[in-house]
Image: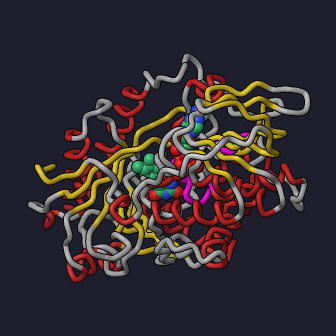
C-alpha cells in the first residue's frame, strides 16, 4: 500500500517543478490585474498582453501551485448536466450553443497547443468509458452513436467482448470510446503557458497574495501583500483555491479534493498489456474515477475523490489503490510512488462559466474539467474585455448562485460522499451479479 518510499507530492512536479518568479517591483497602474496564475489566469493574461494591454498576474504561492499542475491531464471537457438538463434549464437554443462550444473548446485546446508549440506531451489517444452495468452500457452505446452522428466526432460503442482491446479488465460490461479526448502533462502545460505569458510581456508576481480588491469608478484598487496596484479591469481566476480575499466567491464555489496516485515504474510492455491503446480512462461510477498511463507510458496514474480528512494522505491513497486493484487485480504488490491531492471547484449549476460582479470579472468554477475549460474561458474572458468576440460565449452566465448554508466549508460533503458511495456499492453489486450470470 502506501510505502515508506511514497512521495506525497505530484508525480508531475518531478519533470516540471513549481517555479518562483524573480521578485520585481509592482507596477503602480496597469490595464488588467489578474488573480491566480493557473491555466485560466495565464491564458487570459497571454491574450490580453498580445492585444497590447499591460497585464499583471498575482499568485499567492509559487506559480502552478493550484490544480493546474496537479490534475490528471485528461482533456475531457466534461459538462456535468446532460443535454436534457441543459435544455430544461436554459432552453433548446442555449443548450445547443453550450454543447457546440464544448466541442469547439476541445478543438481549440489541440490547436492552441500545436500552434503555440507548447511542450506538454499532448497525446490525442482518445478516451475509454467503462460501463459497470448492462443498462449503463446501453446508455453509453446510444450516446456514442449520437455523438458520432450529430458532430462527426469519432466515437463508438465497445461491447463487453471487445473491452480487452482497450483495457485488460473483467470489470466492465462494455463501454464506449471517443477520440476527441486525449492526455497531456499538466505541469509541463502550466510551465509552457508561463513561458508564453512571460514572452508576451505579462508581469507575473508569484508568492504575492492579493488581500482585497475595491472597485473605483475608472480604476480598481488591488491590495497585495507586496503593495497596491490600480487596474482598469480585474479578473479573478482562483477556482478551487479561492481564499478569504474574495468571501463573495467563496460562498459560491464548493472546493472538493481530488486525489491521484502513481504506480512505480511498471515498464511500457506491462502498461501496454493493461491499456493497449494507451487511452485515457474513466467509468460510470458516481465517485468519478479517472485514470491513465503516464505520458511516457511507463506507469499508471489513478485518480478519484479524496474523502479523507484534510492532511491525511494514507487513507485516501489506500482507497485509490483499492479501486485500481479492483480494475487490475494483477497489480497487487505494486508500489505507489506518488500520491497527492488538489482542489476542484463545483458550483450550483455544475457548469464552468465567465461572469462579472460589478466591475470585477471571473473565469472560474470548472467542475473538475478545467484542462479544457480554463484555457477556453481564459480566452473568452479576454475577448469579452477586448470587445473582440464574434459572439458572446454560451458560458457567459450570471454569477453562480449562493450554495445554501455554505460559507466556505463544505460540511455537507460527507453526506454527499456517503450517498455516492451507496450508489457505487449498488452498481458494484449489480456488476457482480451480471458478470456471474
Ligand atoms: C487532483 C486533480 C485532478 C484533476 N484532473 C483533471 C483532469 O484530468 N482533467 C481536467 O480537465 N481537469 C482536471 N482537474 C481540474 C483542473 O485541474 C482545474 O479545473 C484547472 O486546473 C483550474 O485552473 P485555474 O486556473 O482555474 O485554477 P488553479 O490552477 O487552481 O489556480 C488558481 C490559483 O489561484 C491562486 N490564488 C488563490 N487565491 C489567491 C489570492 N488571494 N491571491 C493570489 N493568488 C491566489 C492559487 O494559489 C492557485 O494557484 C483536476 C484537478 C485536481 C485537483
Residue 240 appears in the figure: no
Q: Is residue 239 above or below residue 385?
A: above
Q: Is residue 397 above or below residue 46?
A: above
Q: Nearer the viewer, residue 99 or 163?
A: 99
Q: Position of residue 123 (x, y in %)?
A: 48, 77
* Residue 434 highlighted magenta (yes or no): no
Residue 14 appears in the figure: yes
Q: Is residue 98 left or right of residue 16?
A: right
Query: Is the C terminus in the top left, top right, bottom left or bottom right quadrant?
Result: bottom left
Name the residue at the front extreme. 25
Q: Nearer the viewer, residue 66 or 282?
A: 66
Q: Position of residue 40 (x, y in %)?
A: 63, 52
Q: Is residue 202 above or below residue 271?
A: above
Q: What is the image's colouring?
A: secondary structure
Q: Residue at x 55, y 45 (%)?
A: 206
* Number of numbered discs overlaid on the protein picture: 0
Q: Position of residue 290 (x, y in %)?
A: 39, 57
Q: Quadrant of residue 296 in the image?
A: bottom left
* Residue 367 highlighted magenta (yes or no): yes
Q: Residue at x 43, y 21 (%)?
A: 411
Name the residue at the top extreme. 405
Residue range corresponding to the magenta coloring: 361-374
Q: Residue at x 56, y 50 (%)?
A: 38
Q: Quadrant of residue 420 in the image?
A: top left
Q: Position of residue 392 (x, y in %)?
A: 85, 53
Q: Residue at x 26, y 49 (%)?
A: 320
Q: Is residue 101 left or right of residue 75?
A: right
Q: Nearer the viewer, residue 387 or 103?
A: 387
Q: Is residue 417 left or right of residue 215?
A: left
Amino acid at each position: 500500500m502506501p510505502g515508506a518510499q511514497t512521495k506525497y507530492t505530484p508525480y508531475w512536479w518531478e519533470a516540471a517543478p513549481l517555479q518562483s518568479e524573480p521578485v520585481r517591483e509592482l507596477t503602480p497602474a496597469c490595464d488588467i490585474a489578474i488573480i491566480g496564475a493557473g491555466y485560466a489566469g495565464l491564458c487570459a493574461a497571454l491574450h490580453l498582453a498580445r492585444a497590447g494591454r499591460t497585464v499583471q498576474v498575482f499568485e499567492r504561492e509559487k506559480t502552478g501551485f493550484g490544480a493546474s499542475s496537479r490534475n490528471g491531464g485528461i482533456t475531457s471537457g466534461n459538462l456535468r448536466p446532460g443535454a436534457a438538463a441543459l435544455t430544461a434549464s436554459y432552453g433548446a437554443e442555449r443548450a445547443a450553443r453550450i454543447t457546440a462550444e464544448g466541442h469547439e473548446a476541445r478543438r481549440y485546446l489541440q490547436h492552441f497547443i500545436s500552434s503555440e508549440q507548447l511542450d506538454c506531451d499532448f497525446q490525442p489517444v482518445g478516451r475509454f468509458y467503462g460501463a459497470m452495468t448492462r443498462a449503463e452500457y446501453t446508455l453509453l452505446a446510444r450516446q456514442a452513436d449520437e455523438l458520432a452522428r450529430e458532430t462527426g466526432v469519432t466515437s463508438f460503442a465497445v461491447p463487453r467482448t471487445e473491452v480487452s482491446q482497450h483495457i485488460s479488465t473483467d470489470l466492465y460490461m462494455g463501454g464506449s470510446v471517443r477520440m476527441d479526448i486525449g492526455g497531456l502533462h499538466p505541469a509541463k502545460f502550466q510551465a509552457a503557458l508561463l513561458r508564453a505569458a512571460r514572452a508576451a510581456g505579462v508581469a507575473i508576481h508569484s508568492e504575492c497574495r492579493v488581500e482585497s480588491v475595491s472597485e473605483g469608478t475608472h480604476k480598481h484598487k488591488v491590495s497585495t501583500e507586496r503593495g497596491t496596484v490600480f487596474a482598469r479591469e480585474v479578473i479573478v481566476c482562483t477556482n478551487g483555491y479561492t481564499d478569504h480575499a474574495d468571501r463573495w466567491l467563496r460562498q459560491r464555489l464548493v472546493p472538493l479534493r481530488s486525489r491521484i496516485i502513481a504506480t512505480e515504474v511498471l515498464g511500457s510492455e506491462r502498461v501496454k498489456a493493461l491499456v493497449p491503446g494507451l487511452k485515457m480512462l474513466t467509468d460510470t461510477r458516481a465517485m468519478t474515477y479517472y485514470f491513465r498511463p503516464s505520458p511516457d507510458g511507463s506507469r499508471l496514474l489513478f485518480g478519484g475523490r479524496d474523502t479523507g480528512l484534510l492532511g491525511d494522505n494514507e487513507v485516501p491513497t489506500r482507497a485509490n489503490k483499492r479501486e485500481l486493484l479492483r480494475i487490475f487485480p494483477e497489480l497487487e504488490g505494486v508500489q505507489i510512488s506518488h500520491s497527492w491531492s488538489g482542489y476542484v471547484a463545483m458550483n450550483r449549476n455544475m457548469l464552468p462559466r465567465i461572469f462579472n460582479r460589478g466591475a470585477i470579472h471571473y473565469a472560474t468554477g470548472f467542475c473538475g474539467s478545467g484542462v479544457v475549460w480554463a484555457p477556453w474561458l481564459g480566452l473568452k474572458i479576454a475577448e469579452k474585455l477586448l470587445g473582440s468576440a464574434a459572439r458572446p460565449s454560451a458560458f457567459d452566465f450570471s454569477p453562480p448562485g449562493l450554495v445554501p448554508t455554505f460559507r466556505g466549508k463544505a460540511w455537507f460533503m460527507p453526506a454527499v460522499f456517503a450517498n455516492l458511495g451507496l450508489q457505487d456499492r449498488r452498481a458494484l453489486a449489480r456488476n457482480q451479479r451480471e458478470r456471474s450470470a
